[in-house]
Amino acid sequence: MKIEWQSTVTCPQCGYKKEETMPQDKCQFFYKCTNCHAVLRPLPGDCCVFCSYGTVPCPPIQLERSGEAGDSSGDCCNTQSDLFRDE
Ligand SMILES: [Zn+2]
C-alpha cells in the first residue's frame, strides 16, 4: 500500500487548484485558498479538507479504504467510525 502525500485541492469558491502536501499525523480541518482566501472546511461526513476538496483523501482514510488500518493508526479520523462500532 503506497500512501499518497500529495493532494490537489480545488477551491469550491473560485475553482483554483493547488497541490498540497498532507500532514502525516493529523487531519487538516481548515484550508485557506491562496487565490481567493476563502477558508474551506470539510463537508459533512468528511474528516478533513483533503477528503472533501482534494484529489486524494487524507492518509488515514487511504489506509482505511485499503483495509490495512491497524489499531495503531491515529484516532483523528476514528471518531465517526466509533458511532458504528459493533460492541
Ligand atoms: Zn479560492
Image (cartoon, rainbow, N blue to C red):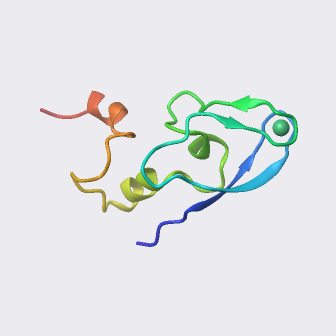
Q: Residue drawn at (60%, 30%), measured in percent from left and top?
A: 43
What is the quadrant of the N terminus in the image?
bottom left
Q: In which quarter of the image is residue 28?
A: top right
Viewer-nearest residue: 36 or 71: 36
Query: Residue placed at 81% from the left, 42% from the top?
Result: 34
Q: Position of residue 73 (x, y in %)?
A: 29, 52
Image quadrant where one finds the C terminus: top left
Residue at 37%, 53% (x, y): give it: 64
Name the outermost residue toward the left: 87
Residue 43 lies, with reference to residue 4, above or below; the image says: above
Image x and y of residue 82, in percent = 27, 32
Q: How many labels does the image show?
A: 0
Q: In the displayed structure, does residue 86 sit left or right of residue 31?
A: left
Q: Which of 28 and 58 is in front in this view?
A: 28
- Quarter of the image for residue 55 reads bottom right
Taking 83 as reference, is 46 left or right?
Answer: right
| Residue 57 image position (x, y, % from top left) | 55, 52
Q: Where is residue 35 in the image (x, y as percent from the top left)?
A: 87, 41
- In which of the image's four quarters is ligand 1 placed? top right
